[in-house]
Amino acid sequence: MYRPFQNLEIKPVFTQYDFDCLYDKYGSAIYGVLLKLTGNETTLAEFLLKEVFVEVFLNKDFNYETDQPSFTHLLRIVIKVTGMHGFPSAAISKIILTPATSRYN
């Protein structure tokens, strides 16, 4: 499996294993949100995904030793990172708050 951060040289507060688990648990959902935001521009969505997880890695506002980040916490980081790259927070909020359509409805 592709691991975009396996050679990152930053000393984290949590282990590589913790980071991999976090990426495995939330990476595909966040990537899906980013794909919708970028209009299925895969290269840009992958770049933003890396930026989001680097921000998670560097986030000093969260105590990773006592808490695991929730999906909501990660979405706040997504909003922050995409905002730094020129995407309005209203666009990302609309994507997050729009219910997924099911083929069974």
Image (spheres, rainbow, N blue to C red):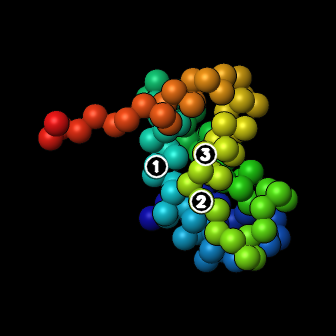
Q: Are marks 1 and 2 in contact (CB under 8 Å)?
A: no
| Tag 2 residue | 70
Which amino acid is tagged 1? Ala
**Which of marks 3 and 1 precedes in the sequence?**
1
| Tag 3 residue | 75
Which amino acid is tagged 2? Ser
Q: Observer-nearest residue: 20 or 2?
A: 20
- Relative placement, left or right, of 84 versus 97 is right
Q: Observer-nearest residue: 1 or 28?
A: 28
Helix, strand or loop status at disc 2: loop
User: Is residue 33 among the parts visible in the rendering?
Assistant: yes
Residue drawn at 59 percent across, 50 percent down: 72
Q: Are marks 1 and 3 in contact (CB under 8 Å)?
A: no
Marks 1/2: CA–CA distance: 13 Å
**What mark, if any, has residue 63 been given in the picture?**
none
Residue drawn at 71 percent across, 38 percent down: 81
Quarter holding the C terminus is top left
Helix, strand or loop status at disc 3: helix
Residue drawn at 49 percent across, 63 percent down: 25
| Tag 1 residue | 29
**Which of marks 2 and 1 precedes in the sequence?**
1
Helix, strand or loop status at disc 1: helix
* Closer mark to the observer between disc 1 and disc 2: 2
- Relative placement, left or right, of 83 versus 74 is right
